[in-house]
Image (cartoon, helix red, strand yellow):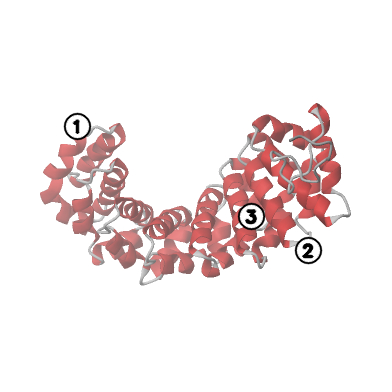
Amino acid sequence: MATTKISQSLPPNIDPTNAPLAFGTRALPKLNRELQDDSLITRQRALMALCDQVHNPEKVHESINVGCMESLKYLLNDPDNTIRQKTTEVLSIMVTHNVGRTSFLENGVINALSKLFDDQIEIVRRNCHICIEVLSEIPSGALGIVDAKLIPKLVEKLKIELEEMKELILDTLHFCMRVDATSALNAGLMPVLKDLLTHTSSIIRGAAARDLMDVTVPLAGKNAACSDPDIIPSLVKLLTDANTDVAARAAGALMTITITTQGKYKALESGAIPALKDLINSEKSEARLNAIKALTTLAEAPRGRAKLLENVKDISEHESDSSKAVARAAEIAKKVITWKP
């Protein structure tokens, strides 16, 4: 039976952890003011509500226009664990949008996030690495990370972080090395990648081989790889890895390193040709392409050409490959192998 007594309970569709939203265009300005409130519970509830709002791309743009990015940057230094966690979560959503990445760069959020790489809370560090990785996917973002001098810190974290975050760091370094590979080389990335080539995770092995290809683009990187007695043999071993992606990326790294004469002979001494010959018949076009290109560079050495002359037929069969890039690479490889002075 209905009574006139008013219940003290909230309606069932009200979330008590979220701040109540104002109507229409006043919602986000109100949330932004609450993000700056002195009361901890007010800041927490405002963050919870904002996290729900920014899943809508239109709200991301609107929240940046009302100044939420500046407020979030300030909250990264908050002593409360929940505040830092939800702040980094909101930022990890906003950075997936172009307007969010632009705002990151304009407001100097990169440096503020990097301070949380040492945070005691795992989820906070993870969210920070997600933000930095997504930001690095655009050239201006990668340049911003390099300019912020974050490469040495990322290399250090690559040694000690959890596996999931190592994957994110390797991806970040991959994009950053497209802008500046020398910084990573000078930060000591080469020996770290060498250790990761034997990691139990195929994802990390493959990412390490891919990053090794990136860091050996400069001549200094090629020389550093050749001076280490274990790197080229480790890459040759990965050519027979059960995971095709790992083998393809190992072939790509060898392709880059063997551009130098020293790299050619070290690869030949490590038995690269037999493994590469098997890889040219892989179902994965990337593996076929990288293997053929690596064999082409090895054929530039007289010893390599002599070994490959008997395999010209196998390589020439790929001149009609379904991949145009592989077909073109096979044509070039045939010319190099059959070249006579």
Give the camera-side residue of 251 and 246: 246
Q: Which SS class for mark 2? A: loop
**What residue is shown at x 31% (from left), y 47% (from top)?**
290
Mark 1 = which residue?
Answer: 320
Residue 340 in sight: no
Q: Label 2 sits on what residue type?
A: Pro
Residue shown at the point (66%, 41%) measured from the top left: 94
The residue nearer to you, when weighing 257 against 93, is 93
Sequence-wise first label, 3 or 2: 2
Around disc 1, counting alpha carbons within 10 Å, would you say few (fewer than 14), some (14 to 19), or many (20 or more)?
Answer: few
Q: Nearer the viewer, residue 66 or 183?
A: 66
**Amino acid under label 3?**
Cys
Write down the quadrant of residue 21 in the picture: top right
Q: Nearer the viewer, mark 3 or mark 1?
A: 3
* Residue 194 visible here: yes
Seen at 23% across and 54% down, the residue is 276
Residue 127 percent location from the top left of the image:
62, 54
Numbered label tally: 3
Q: Which residue is mark 2?
A: 79
Q: Quadrant of the N terminus?
A: top right
User: Where residue 135 sits: x, y (%)?
Assistant: 61, 45
Q: Residue at x 24, y 32 (%)?
A: 322
Comparing 25 with 327, the one in front is 25
Q: Which residue reaches farthest front?
A: 1
* Quarter assignment of residue 272: bottom left
Q: Are marks 2 and 1 in contact (CB under 8 Å)?
A: no
Task: List the single residue furthest toward the bottom.
Answer: 229
**What's the mark number on residue 128?**
3
The CA span between labels 3 and 2 is 16 Å
Q: Residues within 10 Å of mark 3 (few under 14, many from 20)?
A: many
Instruction: Point out which mark residue 235 bears.
Output: none
